[in-house]
Amino acid sequence: MEVIRLALRNLASNRLRVSMAAAAVMVGVAFVVASFLLSDGLRATFDDIIEDTLSEIDLAVRAESDFDEADFQVQTIDEALVDVVRGVDGVATAEPGLETYKIVPVDGDGDPVETAGPPIISANYVESTSSVSVDSGRAPTGPGEFTIDITAADRFDFEVGETYDVIGVDGREPFELVGTIRFGEDNVLGGAVLMTFELSELQRLDGREGAISLVEVVAEPGEDLQRLETRIELALPAGVEAVSSQVIIDEGQEDFGAVIDIFGNILLAFALVSVFVSTFIIANTFNILLGQRIRQLALLRALGASRRQVRVSALFEAFVIGLAASIIGLGLGVALAYLLRAIMNSAGFDLPALELILSARTIITAVVVGVGVSLLSAITPSRRAARVPPVAAMREGYRYGSGEGTRRTIIAIVLAVLGLGGISWSLFGDLDTAPLLVMMGGGAVLTFVSITMFTPLFSSPIARVLGAPLEHLPWLGVTGKMARENASSDNKRTARTAAGLMIGLALVAMASVVATSLKDSFRDQLGSTLTADYLITEPNGGGFSRNVAAELQQLDEFDVVSATRYGNAVINGGERAIAATDLGALTELLDVEVLEGDPADGAGPDRIALDASVVDSLGRGVGDEVLVRFASGSQQLFTINAIFDNEFLIANYVIDLSAWDEHFTLNEDAVVAARLARGVDEQQANAALASLESRFPSLEFETKDAFRERIEGQLDTLLVVINVFLGLAVVIALLGITNTMALAVLERTREIGLMRAVGLTRRQTRTMIRWEAAVVSVFGGILGVGVGVAFGWLAVQAIPDSIIDQLAVPVTSLVVYVVIAGIAGLIAASLPARRAARLDVLDAIREL
């Protein structure tokens, strides 16, 4: 019990330092909690929305498919089936439903509506079975009329009664906004835009006359739904099925839950990085605090305290810190979840009011992370403190701990081998997603720990080298030399202080290397493989009307034009990505390396070209046949007419557009490529495209170079987002530098007092502490950048050559990171430097 009381007194006497250490853990716990709260809250909210959406129907009739459904591949059914379903006994009502993502409204300023990622959904208005209701005005009843949801109307300034252009398969045309609509009670659409049209008008705009997505069925009161489902099935043709509304609800909730899980896991990964950095800060704090109390601990040992009691005292302090950080972090996590939701809403995602679900899993995880990290960080310092010889520790000048040792080096080597082995296995082994992530995360943790254990072996000499220029700066004078000596005098403290910053910057540097390599690879692949002069795409990656390619082919300024579409099909027993394009023009628009055969040879609906990467697994070559089964239920034998090697095409199987038209109901193009006719320049081409651009303003009509620059800009934006999240780990590391420097000031109180007594001014004291921190920060920055480049190289080697085929190191950016680290170190040391400067000289000299 006395040991516990002593631990509590020690915590009370170091409240500020302990609080700063706990803050690092607290921030990590808060992000872990926020990731769980956001995932659970959004999942529960959208599960309710999906359930409410289908609450008015009992059954649905739709196309039958055992494929993994995707938006680009949803099958339609014949509208005539509505009457068939209505004629089945027990059916009260049966209404057609059609959804599409190809129609785009144009606001009053003439700009196509854009979202932050969620789709623009168009559906036919059905009053009897729909969860959509008219908020103002009326529902669309005929040609040239549409409604839009109230949130989008407010955001994009749509007014009922006004006329706006709507872009369909034939381009833009005027429509009257006859009303605004509400989806459910709160119009929660998650940033999507919802429009409704009369069914035949929607089919015309979508280019799918006579087609619908499903039939919504309401049963007669008291009707047995299973028996009704069976009767409907018997009335339906092959390839069409009847399912309960619960089946569709479950599928929708599962699909959306998968998206939420990805979002939550990304947040959780960044949170765990922050927690990992926190462990080094806690460990450093305990090492210094126990080192400062070494005489006290030695006296306790001399008075009869056992090693176990010393360890228990230190571990209890860590337990209290971790428990406090967990409790406060839990509360901060709730606030952070709402803050992240607000940030996403400001970006246009329009998330619903968050349902607060503080589950037992979230609470237990918060406590386990906070307490576990603190206890884990304190184990080694507590054991080292317990092993200190009592008599030796009470002598003046006793040095606590060391940075070297054969045992330590052996452990570091073993951890490095295990860590690098785990990373290599995850990157180059054939693992499923979950084992891959576990192996990669575990390998990275072991590698970082091993690097931290190795760092004391060379931290002092490197710190002396990095600090050497300080001695030659005239405005620093003697303080530069003292800062250099302080940074290199305690190798373990320097190594531990730099460790957190090293991890944060290593991840930032790795992300930069991968992003830069991806950009350079994309630029080279685009330049070497794409011989087309122009590309037409939808900016958000969606499909668009095939009429664009048809009209482009009529322009004399272009001599070769071909669209490309993407879907899925079953080949060789598995679901594969498949592309469709004009096989006859494949080598005209892409510099395809044809290894065998000729894509243009007999190009037509019965030919298929294969990428060389799938030839061995397929066991077939040119002239052989391949059976392909499509989502529509049809299947066909294709003759292989070419084997190629090309990294620009996404799919390994390529069929002709004529074959696509036979087997896919979806008629959207993903990209259209065009080559200029001889003698036509870019200015003439732009003039010829002006009419198409005016009618399809939501599309990008770009030259090859403009397309490349846009994609590179998107990669840069993604890198900024990643670095913002990784920046949290860097901020926590800087908090650790502040804490370590403050503890170092306490540790050197007498030394600082003596220097002040012999003439060191307050200003010189502040300067010395700041530049010491800068040297340590630059050391951590250089170490982090070096490790990050190595990790980036490993990642580039593991990523398929079809995505990244070269390593590019952004030297300028990495140098900037190191400079920023040094400046941040100067800033982080400001408070400890001010405290050191305010020390009373006589009190500091008397400090024991």
Image (cartoon, rainbow, N blue to C red):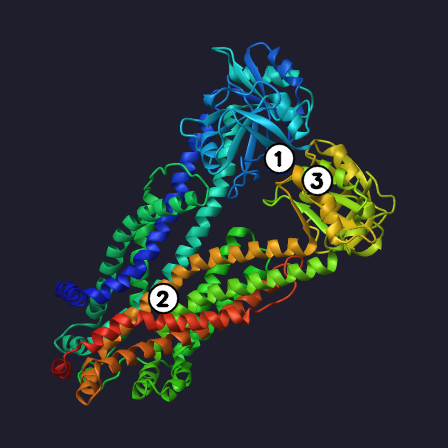
Quadrant where the N terminus is found in the figure: bottom left
Give the secondary structure at mark 3: helix
**Mark toward the viewer: 2 or 1:** 1
Rendering quarter of residue 474? bottom left
Q: Which mark is residue 676?
A: none
Q: Which residue is drawn at 46% across and 41% down?
A: 349
Above or below, 22 relative to 790: above
Task: Please give the residue where the numbered disc 3 appears in the rendered image.
Answer: 691
Give the secondary structure at mark 1: loop
Q: Which amino acid does label 1 sit on?
A: Lys
Task: Please give the residue where the numbered disc 2 appears in the rendered image.
Answer: 733
Of pointers 3 and 2, the one earlier in the residue sequence: 3
Task: Please give the residue where the numbered disc 1 appears in the rendered image.
Answer: 102
Q: From the viewer's perspective, is 674 left or right of 574?
A: right
Above or below, 55 relative to 255: above
Spatial CA span between label 3 and label 2 = 56 Å
Rendering quarter of residue 314? bottom left
Query: How many residues crowd around disc 3 within 10 Å: few (fewer than 14), some, or many (20 or more)?
Result: few
Q: Which residue is drawn at 31% across and 46% down?
A: 334
Of pointers 2 and 1, the one earlier in the residue sequence: 1
Residue 541 vs residue 165, the one in the foreground = 165
Give the secondary structure at mark 2: helix
Above or below, 805 relative to 294: above
Q: Which amino acid does label 3 sit on?
A: Ser
